[in-house]
């Protein structure tokens, strides 16, 4: 997950770690805070070599973490939370509530947080709770504070206060790691930046010297040409517009996530769906698949409308979705490869609910063979396979449903280069045989090489559609960077952030 | 802070294969050892009468545990089974006038309805299984007391023969337990239902996205558990020729969970081991009877059972980590 990552956090700086999903941000943070143990490498804190077997050891050493989800005690008061485990005591060893409350009140007043410290924490908004978590970090004199997506559920006003607190902590000499998908915030707050991609550092340095365009390019890995050659065949721009329309989705809306998104896919066409994290690309395919609650929208497959919004209805109409999150939404780890493959077609390989060994084996063998899944036996547990082979098992699961539309959300993420090329070639082949494919990828090269058309999403809306000669890497990058009203210049004025919805697991 | 050349991967997979083997097959080894020990130290152990008795006493626990294993397979738990046993045994005598079979059926329908209610609460209203079934654990026994009142003597000849009769020397209760083991094993291994149960327990979201109708599978599982518990209640009442709603099936939920877990079914769901459950039920029965026949106090016997359960769960936890 991480390959040879060097990361230096200086005291008195705010340092951001950026990268697309799966780039290794969370893994790095978890390695630093003792949640995961690095296989190799060292961590030094203030010049001394440390190693954490457990998150509590990292905390004791002065590394404080503020997560998106606040890990404080909701039923205790603000004051109790700030001093949790370090409460001032009376002579009898009891908690000195008077001193506790007055000291807590001083702390929050000093930080500019407007809250009554006697309030139960759980009664407060999530933004205030996060600030209390920060206040706690201030009082513990943490030397390192890690803020993982603290702003994702905050309003602008709360963000300002939070940033004020963060700056104060920095000025006290703390080193702060700040992670956010709202790119504009980075220039506003951060001094230094480390960009991760595929588990490796692609760039590190001063935030001010980096413009939005280079940041996104580095994040998406524009210059992966050396080894990033994809296996999509050239010239996919067939006259697909004359082919039959297989999928037509119009007016998809989901509160806070999708605002009137519509896509059309023809037989034999690969439609690319691009957008930064949180732009609504995964939400769009989930909505088509009936796996996301939508408030409006119409989905038509091969001319017949899907009336009920549900997964079985979509499957029945010939839609299949390879979900982005293989682990939590795809693989059933304790089942065999065989059972994982037939999971979506149980009714077809059984009679009266009784599995037909013959039909199961025939189907499973066919797809293992066709996709070149490497295993010792179909009864092997799927969790014992490599990432690439697990992905192939999932592709087999969906192909077995004989879909008319195949929605592929990041089909090549987290699998090795060889498997990646095989998967890409397979997608190509499927489209050639007439399948309508929707391809989502964070890798612009993959999208450009694979798709005939690319729909660019931003903030839950379609910002641009690239067709024909426009399907080209620099055009796509430009669309991702400039799409909509945002400018190239770093904005400090809290422009509507491009990625405030969805996509985060 | 400085991190140099950190190469991290998600928690390292280490195969603790011996541990896994013990978790999977330890129950059979333990059972075999205990049988051997008994042959040596317990007089009259290897007599037909004794083996018969052991099996008769195991049958109700085993039948309840079969339903429990399926529920646990979906990552649920069913604490209601003991009260459902009492309920079906309390209702049955009221209808004995219509004949043995109708009375038994009414008892079983009561179990099915209780399971249906739990299933709907869990799958449609999102109640946690432990809460929904705990409610029935308490309320069900209350209802059984209201219906059954005092201890009732059951002298219906049909029931008496169910409780004490046998075919070719095999008691009806044991015979039906064996048949149910075969049925449940078939359900789990050879039907789409079995795959769906394990898929829901293993990764509910993935199962949902594969088009599996989670609700109906969950409702079915709880109904099956209720039916099996109700039938076990009938068996116990028939054998003792009495129905006492205050004590019948008391703490049965714990014995059943113990049998399932000792048999290698993980409490975290995702797999159902039917044969292991048989082994678990037999092992618990044999431990108790061994201690009893050597005049060990009940309280000690309970502590020994507790140790066995803890060891079994510890092995499960170890496997999940590996």
Image (tube, coloured by chain):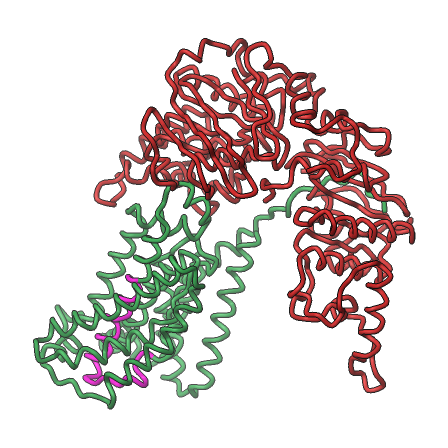
Chain colours: A red, B green
- Depth check: B255 or A397 in front? A397
Kindly indicate the quadrant of the structure image that contains residue A445. Answer: top right
- Which of B284/A293 is in front? A293
**Image position, residue B247 (x, y; %):** 32, 84
Q: Is residue B225 magenta?
A: yes
Q: Which residue lies furthest to the bottom in this view?
A: B150
Residue B3 is inside the magenta segment = no
Q: Is residue B6 left or right of residue A448?
A: right
Residue A106 seen: yes
Q: Give the range drawn in magenta.
A: B223-249
Left or right placement of residue A39 versus residue A112 in this view: left
Quarter of the image where the N terminus of chain A is located: top right
Foreground residue among A187 and B19: A187
Vertical position of residue B278 compared to residue B293: above or below: above
The dominant secondary structure in magenta is helix
Q: Where is residue A117 in the image (x, y as percent from the top left)?
A: 76, 69
Give the residue drawn at x 69%, y 43%.
A27
- Relative side of A44 to A296, left or right: right
Q: Which residue is drawn at 16% across and 81% down?
A: B93
State the residue at coordinates (41%, 48%): B199
In the image, taking residue A193 as reference, residue B132 lies left or right, namely left
Question: Residue A431, how many percent across, how many down?
Answer: 44, 18
Up the image or down, A109 lies above or below A275; here it is below
**Screen quadrant of the C terminus of chain A:** top right
Q: Tell me if residue A417 comes above or below residue A258 in the rendering.
A: above
């Amino acid at each position: 997950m991480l390959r040879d990552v060097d990361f230096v956090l200086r005291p008195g700086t705010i340092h951001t770690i950026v990268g697309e999903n799966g780039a290794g941000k969370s893994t790095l943070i978890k390695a630093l805070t003792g949640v995961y143990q690095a296989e190799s490498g060292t961590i030094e804190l203030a010049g001394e070599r440390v190693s954490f077997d457990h998150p509590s050891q990292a905390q004791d050493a002065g590394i404080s973490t503020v997560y998106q989800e606040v890990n404080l005690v909701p039923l205790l008061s603000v004051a109790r939370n700030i001093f949790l485990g370090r409460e001032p005591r009376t002579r009898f060893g009891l908690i000195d509530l008077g001193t506790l409350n007055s000291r807590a009140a001083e702390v929050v007043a000093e930080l500019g947080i407007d809250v009554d410290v006697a309030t139960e924490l759980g009664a407060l908004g999530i933004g205030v709770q996060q600030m209390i978590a920060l206040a706690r970090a201030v009082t513990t004199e943490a030397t390192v504070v890690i803020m993982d997506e603290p702003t994702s559920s905050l309003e602008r006003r709360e963000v300002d206060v939070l940033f004020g607190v963060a700056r104060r902590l920095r000025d006290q000499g703390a080193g702060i790691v700040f992670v956010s998908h709202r790119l504009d915030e980075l220039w506003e707050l951060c001094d230094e930046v480390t960009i991760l991609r595929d588990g490796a550092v692609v760039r590190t340095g001063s935030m001010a010297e980096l413009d939005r365009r280079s940041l996104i390019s580095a994040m998406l890995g524009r210059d992966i040409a050396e080894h990033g050659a994809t296996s999509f065949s050239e010239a996919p721009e067939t006259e697909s517009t004359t082919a039959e329309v297989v999928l037509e989705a119009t007016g998809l809306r989901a509160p806070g996530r999708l605002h009137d998104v519509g896509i059309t896919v023809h037989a034999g066409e690969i439609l690319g769906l691009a957008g930064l994290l949180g732009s609504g690309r995964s939400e769009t395919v989930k909505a088509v698949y009936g796996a996301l609650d939508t408030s409006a929208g119409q989905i038509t497959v091969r001319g017949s409308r899907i009336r009920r919004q549900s997964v079985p209805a979509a499957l029945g109409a010939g839609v299949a979705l390879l979900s982005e999150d293989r682990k939590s939404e795809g693989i059933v780890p304790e089942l065999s490869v065989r059972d994982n493959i037939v999971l979506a077609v149980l009714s077809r390989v059984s009679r009266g609910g009784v599995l037909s060994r013959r039909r199961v084996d025939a189907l499973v063998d066919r797809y293992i063979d066709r996709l070149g899944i490497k295993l010792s036996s179909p009864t092997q547990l799927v969790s014992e396979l490599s990432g690439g082979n697990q992905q192939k098992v999932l592709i087999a699961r969906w192909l077995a449903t004989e879909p008319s539309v195949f929605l592929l959300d990041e089909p090549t993420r987290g699998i090795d280069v060889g498997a990646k090329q095989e998967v890409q070639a397979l997608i190509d082949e499927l489209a050639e045989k007439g399948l309508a494919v929707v391809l989502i990828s964070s890798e612009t090269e993959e999208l450009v090489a694979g798709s005939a058309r690319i729909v660019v999403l931003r903030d839950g809306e379609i910002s641009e559609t690239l067709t024909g000669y426009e399907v080209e890497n620099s055009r796509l990058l430009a669309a991702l960077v400039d799409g909509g009203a945002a400018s190239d210049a770093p904005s400090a004025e809290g422009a509507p952030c491009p990625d405030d919805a969805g996509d985060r697991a | 802070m400085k991190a140099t050349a950190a190469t991290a991967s998600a928690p390292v997979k280490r195969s603790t294969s011996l541990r896994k083997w013990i978790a999977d097959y330890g129950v059979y080894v333990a059972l075999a050892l205990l049988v051997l020990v008994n042959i040596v130290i317990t007089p009259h152990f290897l007599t037909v009468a004794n083996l018969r008795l052991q099996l008769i006493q195991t049958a109700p626990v085993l039948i309840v545990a079969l339903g429990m294993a399926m529920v646990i397979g979906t990552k649920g738990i069913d604490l209601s089974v003991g009260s459902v046993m009492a309920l079906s045994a309390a209702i049955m005598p009221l209808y004995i006038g219509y004949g043995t079979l109708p009375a038994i059926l009414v008892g079983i329908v009561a179990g099915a309805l209780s399971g249906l209610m739990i299933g709907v609460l869990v799958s449609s209203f999102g109640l946690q299984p432990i809460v929904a079934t705990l409610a029935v654990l308490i309320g069900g026994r209350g209802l059984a007391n209201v219906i059954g009142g005092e201890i009732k003597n059951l002298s219906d000849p049909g029931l008496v023969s169910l409780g004490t009769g046998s075919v070719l020397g095999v008691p009806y209760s044991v015979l039906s337990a064996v048949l149910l083991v075969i049925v449940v094993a078939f359900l789990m291994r050879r039907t789409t239902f079995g795959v769906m149960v394990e898929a829901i327990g293993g990764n509910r979201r993935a199962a949902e996205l594969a088009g599996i109708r989670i609700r109906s599978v969950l409702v079915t599982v709880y109904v099956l558990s209720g039916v099996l518990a109700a039938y076990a209640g009938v068996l116990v009442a028939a054998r003792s020729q009495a129905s006492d709603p205050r004590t019948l099936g008391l703490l049965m939920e714990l014995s059943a969970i113990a049998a399932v877990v000792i048999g290698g079914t993980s409490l975290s769901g995702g797999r159902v081991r039917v044969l292991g459950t048989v082994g678990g039920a037999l092992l618990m029965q044999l431990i108790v009877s061994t201690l009893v026949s050597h005049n060990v106090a009940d309280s000690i016997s309970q502590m020994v059972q507790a140790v066995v359960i803890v060891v079994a769960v510890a092995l499960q936890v170890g496997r999940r980590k590996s």
